[in-house]
Image: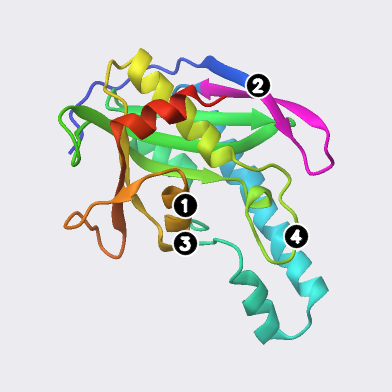
Amino acid sequence: MTTGRKRRSFLREIEQGELIHVSKKKVPYRIVHGWSLESSIECDTCWKQGWLALFQQIQQMEPDETKQSELLATISTEDFHWDWFKKALASSTDEYEWFHLYADGKPQAACLIYHPKPSALEPGNIFYVEFVAVAPWNRKSGFRVREFTRLGETILRAAQRFAVNDLKLRPGFGLHSLPKAEGFYTNINMVKVPGKEKDTMLYFELSRNHAIELMETS
């Protein structure tokens, strides 16, 4: 049960840089920290439209329903039901920190963390990733090219830097992974920690040294 003080909405740009669009064009991005119902509603609205566009593309490409299901299975849809507005209403106290990555005029990724959390690997407090996701058009699939890549890593890096610099936590974070996301977390050097499963989700944690490497990556 959350016991923290409910915070006022205060948004601050904490990072900016450039992304490479699928068209090879460089597109500026910014990461905004802070609780915002507006940002959560933008994720719900824009991303639902993105999902609809993907489903329509599959139907246009393949009339056979079995093959449609095979194409759909190539993209991670496990978080399709997430309601970011409801998450914002439920996670507005001081234990939570919100991050949104904007580029091309819309939210491209979102991340919610909880702190502090004792590390399962090493001494000290880290943060826990409650939710992290990228927009549907930025997901790897078997039928289209992503508009932007490496957004999950980019927004987690920003969250890690914020946790160290602003929250004074030691480098490192943990999370329970959706099954289809496990490969991504392994690729950024997170390790499975036995005995800390939640439902069907395995627990992953990033060690101090690998977290420092992540923060130092440009």
Q: Position of residue 90 (x, y in %)?
A: 34, 38
Residue drawn at 65 percent across, 21 percent down: 17
Kindly indicate whether the residue at mark 3 contacts the one at mark 1 (C-beta within 8 angstroms). no
- What is the number of the mark on residue 144? 4
* Amino acid under disc 1: Trp
User: Within the image, what quadrant is residue 46 found in?
Assistant: top right
- What is the number of the mark on residue 17? 2
- What is the number of the mark on residue 82? 1
* Amino acid under disc 4: Arg
N-term-proximal mark, 3 vs 2: 2
- Nearer to us in this view, 200 or 188: 188
Tell me which secondary structure the magenta stretch mostly adopts: strand
- What is the number of the mark on residue 129? none
Q: Is residue 51 magenta?
A: no
Q: Is residue 72 visible?
A: yes
> Is label 2 or label 1 in front?
2
In the depicted structure, whether residue 158 falls above or below residue 134: above
Q: Which residues are magenta?
A: 17-32
Q: CA distance from mark 2 to mark 1?
A: 28 Å
Badge 4, how many Cα within 10 Å: few under 14, some, many 20+? Answer: some
